[in-house]
Amino acid sequence: MKTGVIGLGAMGGPMAVNLKKAGLLECAWNRSPGPAQALADENGIPLAEDPAEVARRCDAVIVCVSRDEDVLSVMDAMAEGLHKGLVVVDCSTVSAETAREAARRAAAGGADFLDAPVSGGTEGARQGTLAIMVGGDAGVLQRVQPALDAIGKKTVHMGAHGAGQATKAVNQIIVAGTNQAVTDGLAFGQAAGLDMERVIEVVGSGAAGSWHLNNRGPTMVRGVFDPGFKVALHKKDLGIARAMVEELTDNRLASIERTLADYEKLLEDGHGDEDISSLYRLKKALFKESN
């Protein structure tokens, strides 16, 4: 299966590398040529001139960009290269309606489309262990499964177009709540003078254990917030989730609203490119202010 990648950022770059290792990568393209060339030189990745060339040369194209407008822009840029038998697999996090519109644009060129957002952060992208939630035709998914197996450890078909993105919204809402709980708890523990390594060891082995506690707890209590998932991107995703919630109810979810407000503060303070665990900065400050 000849597979292309469009978008060679923190997630798409490692995906391309893993596809290359699996012998599936045909070519790749990135809007910013400098980072793309550096990745290509280091890993032997062939670059295409434009998205249309990627589409023409491939059986499957994995798209991994940041925003709704970027996904639709890529679909338009691929238009001249779309063809029957091609499957466009969008791993970006966008709204369900954007996914359905992208599917319509793919179909206009004779191609198939899957919305396939991922979870697992940059570590999962590098290790090829992403969780992939897919919306679209199950038969189409079967055709591109070899490519998805190269970038992820678990792929689940969620339903029609848009269902993958709705599932990703579930993921992002839960991540927001988990981030709030972990940072609250650890900030309290540190203020209480506990040995935080031991706290994380024992609490992480019990009912309060989570990926976020075990993987981000040790770094956040040391004040290290290297990005695995940037604050600015999660804020964008929660805005999408909020809009989906508003389609279903007049009520709001506290985890979304509180986290959006906290992220706005972090952005104002210049921490938008840090990992979401930098929420810990705000929680530690609460205890400092009370002492």
Image (tube, rainbow, N blue to C red):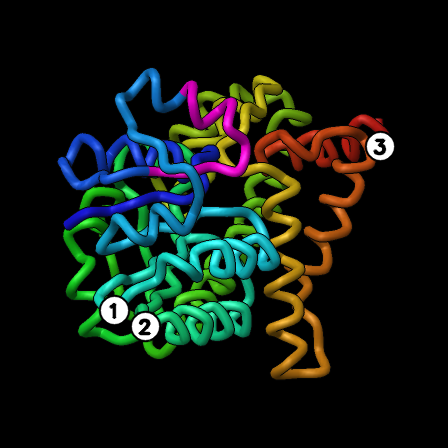
Given the image, on which type of amino acid does mark 3 rest? Answer: Ser
Tell which circle, 3 or 1, labels the residue nearer the N-terminal end: 1
The amino acid pointed to by label 1 is Lys
In the image, is 80 to the left or to the right of 289? left
Please say if 77 is above or below 127.
below
Residue at x-position 16% and y-position 65%: 142
| Image location of residue 215, percent across then percent down | 42, 32
Q: Quadrant of the C terminus?
A: top right
The answer to whether residue 190 is left or right of residue 26 is right
Q: Is residue 255 above or below residue 160?
A: above
x then y, percent, for residue 208 = 44, 46
Pointer 3 with pointer 2, Cβ within 8 A: no
Look at the image and give the residue range highlighted in magenta.
28-38
Query: Identity of the amino acid at label 2?
Result: Gly
Q: Is residue 256 left or right of residue 289?
A: left
SS type, badge 3: helix
Residue 90 position in % (x across, y down)? 40, 57
N-terminal of the two: label 1 or label 2?
1
**Residue 47: image x %, image y %?**
35, 32
In-front residue for pair 271/149: 149
Q: Which residue is mark 2?
A: 110
- Observer able to see residue 269: yes
Judge the density around disc 1: few (<14), some (14-19), many (≥20) Cα neighbours within 10 Å. few
Q: CA distance from mark 3 to mark 2?
A: 62 Å
The residue tagged 3 is: 290
Determine the CA span between mark 3 and mark 1: 64 Å
Q: What distance separates the C-alpha of mark 1 from that of mark 2? A: 5 Å
Residue that numbered label 1 is attached to: 84
Q: Are marks 1 and 2 in contact (CB under 8 Å)?
A: yes
